[in-house]
Image: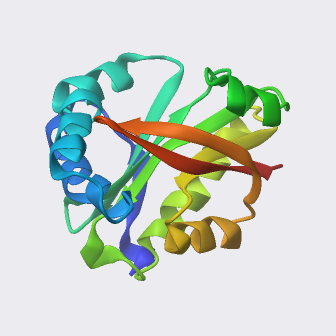
Amino acid sequence: MSDSVAITPATADDADELAVVAAATFPLACPPGSAPEDMAAFIAEVLSADRFREYLGDPGRVVLKAVLGGEIVGYALLNAMEPADPAVAEVITLRPVTELSKMYVLPGQHGSGVSAALMRRALEHSRAGSSKAVWLGVNQQNARAQRFYGKHGFTVAGTKTFTVGNQLHHDYVMLHEF
């Protein structure tokens, strides 16, 4: 239940466990037909324990962890920086803005309230940091995630591409304004 989940900032000591959760959850967000080798390459390049240590050491980023029963069951990566992608910068014009770069919860926790608690905390953190909005990219084929984000006040603002290994995916850019 979400009332027993703790959402707190992660530390470098959490990097290994975050990488395990990331490896288990990232493929779930990829569209059908995604090549396993492309997903594995993305996980190795972007979601390794070393990369999490980099994210955790970057003052422009925060990783929130969802802990249940002493185990990390989900995480969110927030980037408080200008959108680097020109397609995103064109449609996300509010400043300052935070990107909800990643938000994943282990499948056994789907529907339990953990995702909602993690989202609430991510939005609270962003707003407390003076962001006027939070944006994210979500695969255009991931209707479940789109519904979840919509329930939390996100609307489609545009589109962008996202590369996973050698595959180009098409995402919606969604925006939550405060």
The reply to whether residue 18 is visible in this rendering is no
Image spot of residue 65 (x, y percent): 36, 49
Colour basis: rainbow
Q: In the image, 50: left or right of 77?
A: left
Residue at 28% of width from left, 66% of height from top? 106
The image shows residue 53, relative to residue 78, as above or below, that is above
Q: In the image, 160: left or right of 73?
A: right
Image spot of residue 66 (x, y percent): 36, 57
Q: In the image, 169: left or right of 49?
A: right
Residue at 52% of width from left, 67% of height from top? 145
Report how many numbered discs are placed on residues in the image: 0
Image spot of residue 14 (x, y percent): 22, 38
Tell me the quarter of the image containing the N terminus. bottom left
Image spot of residue 7 (x, y percent): 43, 55
The image shows residue 102, relative to residue 107, as above or below, that is above
Residue at 66% of width from left, 34% of height from top? 98
The reply to whether residue 178 is visible in this rendering is yes
Residue at 62% of width from left, 25% of height from top? 85
111 or 89: nearer the eye?
89
Q: Quadrant of residue 50?
A: top left
Q: Quadrant of residue 71?
A: bottom left
Q: In the image, 140: left or right of 70?
A: right
